[in-house]
Image (spheres, helix red, strand yellow):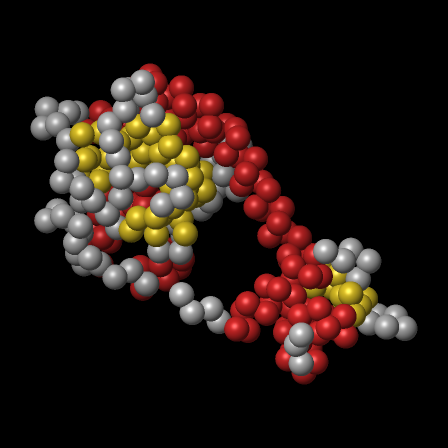
Amino acid sequence: MKMNRTTQRTVEILKLVSRRPDGITLDEICGALNMPKTSAYDIVATLAEMDMVHVNKGQKQTYTIGLAAYRIGVNYTNNLDFISIIEPELRVFSKEVGKTVFFGVRSDHEVVYICKFEPENPIITTATVGTKNPMYSTSLGKAILAYTDEETRQQIMDRIHFEPKTERTIRTREDLERELAKVRRQGYALDAREMEDHMECVGAPVFGADGHVLGAISLSSLYKPAEDYDGLGQLISRKAAEVSKMLGYLGKSV
């Protein structure tokens, strides 16, 4: 993958500034990163304008980490905290239902698997922690996308390139829109053998205290024609509501 040079330098500057709570000068930044002063100044000035770094004026102007960068760090820490809260609950849930349970979050226009919990005799699944799959063909992705705010949802869908994984995979934006409306009506999403012919999954959204969707949980199992997937959908929806309540969610999603 080809990396964007300006973005790479921006991240390097932020890392450098974060290691100097006492402040760092522009000359020190240039020396540490072997950058031309004009290039470094343009990046630092932009970061300062966006509140990612704070400018300390004095005999020598220095830079420290800004409030916006601090808030991003706090959000990351909070995310780690909520994972530790839901892990025990989902581990027990997996054993109770005898199915593999996943928790996933959105990563741009894909869903990334953050946690995986298996019963005593698990089925083999291709999804592992850290892997990504399309939002339009997974129950996790559909559950998240259905409850994402309208503006963000449309931006995400603009970046989706529909590729069939099986003959049942959703292939158009219009079909996905209809599917997401159905998810919102019933409170859960299905992966009706859209990723793998032999697998069927149900997923439901998890909300944070601010009412925004944090991610989703799902149940995965081998497809069985006699399985009550609506019943499993209601089950996962109730569990997702319980988990959301544990995280401080009390009202309607926004």
User: Residue 240 location, x and y as percent?
Assistant: 38, 31
User: Residue 162 location, x and y as percent?
Assistant: 22, 58
Instruction: For the N terminus, give its image quadrant.
Output: bottom left
What residue appears at the point 69 percent right and 61 percent down from the top-left corner? 16
Res 51 seen here = no
Q: Quadrant of residue 61?
A: bottom right
Residue 193 sits above or below residue 27 on the image: above
Q: Quadrant of residue 175?
A: bottom left
Along the viewing direction, whichever of 112 and 140 lies nearer the viewer: 112
Along the viewing direction, whichever of 119 and 106 lies nearer the viewer: 119
Left or right: residue 21 versus residue 73 is right
Left or right: residue 119 versus residue 149 is left
Left or right: residue 49 versus residue 246 is right
Residue 192 sits above or below residue 23 on the image: above
User: Residue 190 location, x and y as percent?
Assistant: 23, 38
Res 171 seen here = yes
Q: Quadrant of residue 158?
A: bottom left
What residue appears at the point 34 percent right and 29 percent down from the top-left corner? 101
User: Residue 215 location, x and y as percent?
Assistant: 41, 41
Left or right: residue 194 versus residue 85 is left
What residue appears at the point 71 percent right and 61 percent down from the top-left corner? 17
